[in-house]
Image (spheres, helix red, strand yellow):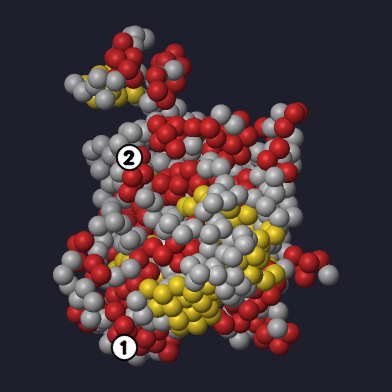
Amino acid sequence: KPNSAAFAYLRKYAGACGKECISVEKKLVVISELACAQCLNRAKACPGGAVSVVRLPNSLTTDTTHRYGPNSFKVHGLPTPRPGSVLGLLGTNGIGKSTALSILSGRVKPNLGRFEPPLATWADVVKYYRGSDLQNYFTKVLENKLKVAIKPQLAPGFATRLKGKVVRDLISARDERKIMDKIVKDLDLEHVLDREVQQLSGGELQRFAIAATICKDADVYMFDESTSFLDVKQRLAATDAIRDICEESCWPGGAAESSRKYVIVVEHDLAILDYMSDYVQCLYGNPGIYGVVTSRSQVRNGINQFLAGYFPAENMRFRPYELTFKVSTNDFFVSTELGDDEEEGSVPDSKSQQIGELRYPEMTKSYGSFTLYVEPGSFRAGEVIALMGENGCGKTTFLELLAGRTAEQRGKEKAIGSHGAGSDGTPPSLKSLGVAYKQQILPSKIRKFEGTVQELLEQEINIALTDRLFRLLVIKALKVDELQDLHVRSLSGGEMQRLSIVLCLGTPAYVYLIDEPSAGLDCEQRVVAAKVMKRWIVNHLGRTCFVIEHDFVMATSMADQVIVYEGTPGVSCVAKSPCSVIDGFNLFLKHLDVTFRRDPINYRPRINKKNSQKDKEQKSRGDYFLFDNDLED
């Protein structure tokens, strides 16, 4: 900004080397990419970190597919969809997945890195991809022979643009394939058909967007993050509906018609991406600076190479550490930064102040026509209890009861485990023991905070900021330190989610209640967040954590105990007593009629194809989920 210290600094050195490495044009500072070494060093020293100088691999100096401008984000390569199959895209946020979809849809013309005249034409693009599958694809785009249907990300203004319109009318208007009744039933939308769009919940809005896209008669179908806000059952239903696009039985023309359909999906849930895709292409690079699209590969190999941080075909190591899901493994990269007096596995004095085993009584909570019955149970310090169930079955309600936030608990708080708790009909809570609660939706006082991230952290968890281990194991690991100078109101959904996790973990408490921590996070951030939360709460503090999570990969990497919910969502549900991970996951997956196995390389959960040999074998044994020890036997 013109009045900032960074602007004044750069204006001072503009033209200092005798060239136009740094120049000022009215209220705009321009730094040439061909700047001399002296000016680059000056730019690196710019106050406030306003300038970022990034070294690119030599292989990225050419072969640019699209670039937004000088010193702007660029993408190298493009996904190569194959007709009659589902192509999955895997990569972190800000790496170019949505840009790639915009190019393949024809909405953005790739400029081949030429953002100044002469600009690239569509003929240049077709010639550039001569000899590849993309030549035929872009030829059809140029001749308007490809009709594209896109399910975009659910941005905050998505429902606002459709305000006042009824779900039934919107889907019916797009039902070019005459399959509305089947899709509505498969995605469980029958009860919301007569509602207006702005009245839908996040999960209902996501399923509506998927249904409206599938009902179109198109040549290319694109789904950008199609499982956000959905529970496990709904994610599987949405996956089956998307995969049916390539099934010959779903088209009047049979195999001849289905084999011409392109399907491209962007997904951060690794288990769903694995189950949904026939092939996968990964993207790596530096978020917001450049992204590189890898070659097409088999799903298992592509995901495993992404988690390993190394692509053998490209001989590229893009991450210095490997991501694995074996529960007993040591965490990544943090241990190398601890001092000799703070070695890995050390715990604070507060760990000796354990709460022991706490038992909670049977509880009941009603909201209108919905009733939640909570079976009596117990928990102890140093455990993560995962709450597994469909949307609308009372998981958040249970956390509200534990936090003492319901209307009947106010002013009558009785601590769980105390004498006479629950005897008067009022559900007891953990409020008097100390609770840190990360809600599904951040409180408005935080979302509308006027200051920077650093100012919010100092206001809410100032004591935790003085703890070197907290800064290292939580703030730095979640990369919230990179956000400290940004205004809270300007943060994206993923950035706000990471900030809310830091605020929760920085609050002194005996019990931590965390509601859907993976929402808004990309695939890599989810793995990191799961390890950070378990490492800090369980290994370091020795406290208890209750977590609601629909990402099965994240849930399995955190859980020590499981509470399974049964019943009819929105009507009457029962929260079972906490049970072991093996019993809990097997019971939950049995209700869904789905089996999981673990990958032998990195132990990530993988969904078995329905009625496959592995699926039948595990169901016959009653092993709906395989654990690490099953692989070692």
What residue do we see at 32% from left, 40% from top?
449
Determine whether the residue tagged by mark 1 lies in a helix, strand or loop: helix
**Distance Cα–Cα, label 2 vs label 1:** 45 Å
Please give the residue where the numbered disc 1 appears in the rendered image. Answer: 181
Q: What percent of the width, then of the height, locates residue 304? A: 63, 58
Residue 393: x and y, percent? 46, 74
Residue 25 visible in this rendered orientation of the protein:
yes
Q: Determine the residue positioned at 31% across, 10% down.
A: 12
As shown in the figure, which amino acid type bears the numbered disc 2? Phe
16 over 205 or under it: above or below: above
Q: Earlier in the sequence, mark 2 or mark 1?
A: 1
Image quadrant holding the N terminus, namely top left
Single out the residue that lies furthest toward the left: 164
- Judge whether 68 appears above or below 405 on screen: above
> Along the horizontal axis of the image, is 469 left or right of 403?
right
Q: Front-most of 197 and 525?
A: 197
Residue drawn at the location 36% of the way across and 9% of the way down: 17
Graded by Cα atoms within 10 Å as few (under 14), some (14 to 19) or many (20 or more), the crowding at tag 1 reads few
Return the residue nearer the eye: 266 or 119: 266
Figure disc tally: 2
